[in-house]
Image (cartoon, rainbow, N blue to C red):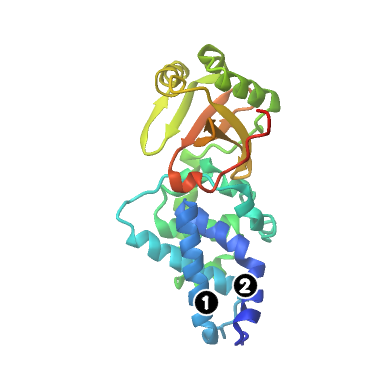
Amino acid sequence: MLPKSADVFGDHVAVYRGELFAHCYRMLGTVAEAEDALQEALTRAWQGRQTYREPISFRAWLYRIATNTCLNAIEARKRERTEPGPCPDELLMGVASADAGPEARYELHESVSLAFLTVLQALPPRQRAVLLLRDVLAFRGAEVARLLGTSVKAVNSSLQRARTTLRGSYARAGLANPPDLLERYIRAWEAADVAGLVALLREDAVLTMPPQPSVVGARSIGQFLAESIFSIAPMRLIATRANGGPAYAAYLGERLFAVLVIESDGRQIAQIRAFADPLLLSRFNPRIPLGS
């Protein structure tokens, strides 16, 4: 039996709030949708607290409510697929406290990377839920079947299909972004040094700017930046963090213009993800150092 007091119930939930947010973020792909889903899930948990008498842990019960809330949100969407947006690291603090266990196939920080989230959003929703519950959070097959109201056979089938999709479309991150590579990237960007920036990119590098079309190839990226970005005004990059890795807030004067998330192969930059949505930018606001 769960506590009747809202304050005491809130204390019980607070232990899991961070990891539940991360789960909703993985399921839905954007911070705004994850926050809405988490709030709805916690409201449902409070309203349905008297029904918690099943032989599952309180944590598992919360995950069942959160997962089903996300599945309902996906079904209600007017679009088939969401382009994942970056999440400030401070909103993912609960990821580190989640007890994934040795059976998890994906390290918890990797599981909130934009590369991983992009592939997740291509999975059918229930496959996505099964993969996250089994391979990220390491719930057992029987537990997942109970949480989703289905059979172990159906869970195993969905899991195999999801794993097959990931094997074919997700390249796991290897080396971290080297600090010297990032420093050269900052210098080239702030100097509008197109040649210097192109030299840091892989030949098959990709620049994404949702909802605009992607730009593919180092030379094409350089040409696009020269004509569409560097021609606007001098720009400063201020270091921040998103999705467990380095990111940069790009400022035009004192106005935050975009958030840039960089991915490399350890030697060259493989992808630049640029985001300029005003709602998203409002979550990233690192201060420009005095005297800069």
Nearer to the camera, 240 or 271:
240
What residue lies at 49% left-to-right and 24% top-to-bottom? 205
List x then y, in percent, for residue 146: 51, 73
Q: For mark 2, what is the residue?
A: 13
What residue lies at 57% left-to-right and 32% top-to-bottom? 263
Horizontally, residue 96 falls left or right of residue 111, namely right
Q: For mark 1, what is the residue?
A: 45
Distance, label 1 to label 2, CA atoms, is 9 Å
Type of amino acid under label 1 = Ala
Q: Quadrant of the N terminus?
A: bottom right
The answer to whether residue 239 is above or below residue 86 is above
Residue 129 in sight: yes
Nearer to the camera, 106 or 201:
201
Type of amino acid under label 2 = Val
Q: Quadrant of the C terminus?
A: top right
Residue 153 in sight: no
Which of disc 2 and disc 1 is earlier in sequence? 2
